[in-house]
Image (cartoon, rainbow, N blue to C red):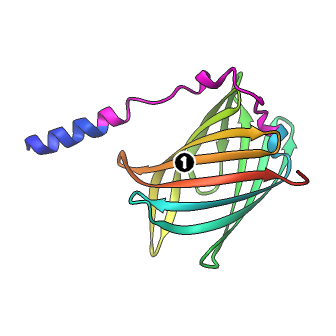
Amino acid sequence: MRKRLLVLLFVCLAGCGGVDVRQYSAQNPKLDLPGFFVGRVDGWGMFQKRSGEVIKRFHVLINSRMDGQNLIMHEDFTYSDGSKQTRTWTLHPDGPGRWRGTAGDVVGESSGEVAGNALHWRYVLSLPVDDKVYQVHLDDWMYLIDENTMTNRSAMTKLGIEVGQVTLFFRRQGA
């Protein structure tokens, strides 16, 4: 019993720390979310298990447009095993530097905050693996490297325990 309490305490404490996106407020270039994503953006990435083993690599083609104040992002994924997936996000502003969004395989609503060159984005994803679907938490950090290049690192957790990471690089079309 004591061992279980120590594990639970460790998991709770691990979730308490973290970086505040506002510490990047002075960083340049400044990230304008629609300004970066509207149009065509290509992305390349990989999913790694917590051991570091690369499970899948992928390419994602993102075509985005504005619909009023909403940023509509259509993503077409092609994975290294030949499988394909699509996701369409609808993002809307939720105050200065804040965004909320939905997508078909996202549970509830996602939320994010932009400051300087960074975006911190959080959501719960329904993730199909083999014959099961798991609900995993994603904690995304995106950083604008230059006007046309962005990097993204995501921690994927289930029940507060990291199960893997996603690393992505985005490049705006024509850059």
Between 44 and 60, the residue placed more toward the observer is: 44
**Most prominent secondary structure in the magenta stretch?**
loop
Quarter of the rendering occupied by the N terminus: top left
Residue 119 position within the rendered picture, expressed as x and y whole percent measured from the top left? 65, 35
Mark 1: amino acid: Ser
Q: Is residue 27 magenta?
A: yes
Residue 60 position within the rendered picture, expressed as x and y whole percent measured from the top left? 72, 62
The extreme right residue here reads 174
Element at badge 1?
strand
Name the quadrant containing residue 43: bottom right
| 22 shown above or below 150 | above
* Residue at (64% x, 56% y) in the render: 104
Between 128 and 32, the residue placed more toward the observer is: 32
Q: Which residue is mark 1?
A: 154
Query: How many numbered tags mark residues here?
Result: 1
* Residue at (55% x, 69% y) in the render: 56
Q: Please give the range of residues in magenta.
A: 12-34
